[in-house]
Amino acid sequence: MDSLDPDLGPGAEARLISPAAARNAAPILAVLRDVLPSWGRVLELASGSGEHALHFARALPGLEWQPSDPSPRARASIAAWRDAEGPDNLLAPIALDVTHRPWPVADFAALVCINLLHISPWAAGQALFAEAGARLPVGGVCFVYGPFQRDGAHTAPSNAAFDADLRRRDPAWGIRDLAAVEAEARRHGLGLSRVVEMPANNLSLVFQRD
């Protein structure tokens, strides 16, 4: 869960700290370096605390990084991190609910979505791929990260327990099956070009627009 750190200095009251973001930023960045273009605008969905956006924008200076989130609290955190430490290529966060189409954002060369599909209704995944298929350029990358089932089964007991907890919190949430995700993406002209095993039983999925 995100929390506040009193030692961050001025503006600390707005900055959220996500332990998960700190743990997975480096492994995710390693995949992004391989699959994202060297220049252009990247739209990040559900940017949360903003720590990923800060980390990736610093490491990928040729890209304009556009964070977004539907939560005012999250956008305040993203803006505070940007004001305190952000490089010039980290843009101000925008309000964006994935399910409200068309998205209120300028064109983008690539799309990054981290830990969204399992903490949202399936309608969010459908909107994600519909918008990606309509808006990405040919060959454009849609990067999706999180836990997934494979062949209808969880990949680890911890994922099964996590899935049960998610569904108790909201029956519309839950860990999605990779085959269903791939099929939905394909409906919108997005082919699954790479599946990367990640720490803590997560996957990085790399889709490209046909």
Image: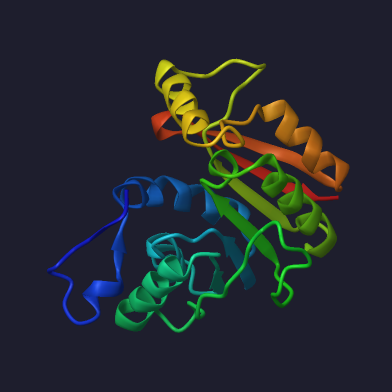
Tell me the quarter of the picture where residue 153 sits: top right
**Spot occupied by residue 139 in the image (x, y as percentages of width and height):** 79, 56
Please say if 135 is above or below 182.
below
Is residue 198 found left or right of 134 in the rendered image?
left
Is residue 121 found left or right of 3 in the rendered image?
right
Could you say which is closer to the camera, residue 40 or residue 190? 190
Please say if 104 is above or below 20.
below
Could you say which is closer to the camera, residue 139 or residue 136? 136
Residue 137 visible in the displayed image:
no
Q: State the count of labels.
A: 0
Residue 152 visible in the displayed image:
yes
Instruction: Give the colouring mode of the picture.
Output: rainbow
**Spot occupied by residue 95 in the image (x, y as percentages of width and height):** 58, 72
Residue depicted at x 46% and y 71%:
72
Residue depicted at x 48% and y 74%:
61
Is residue 145 found left or right of 199 in the rendered image?
right
Residue depicted at x 42% and y 21%:
161
Please say if 153 is above or below 38.
above
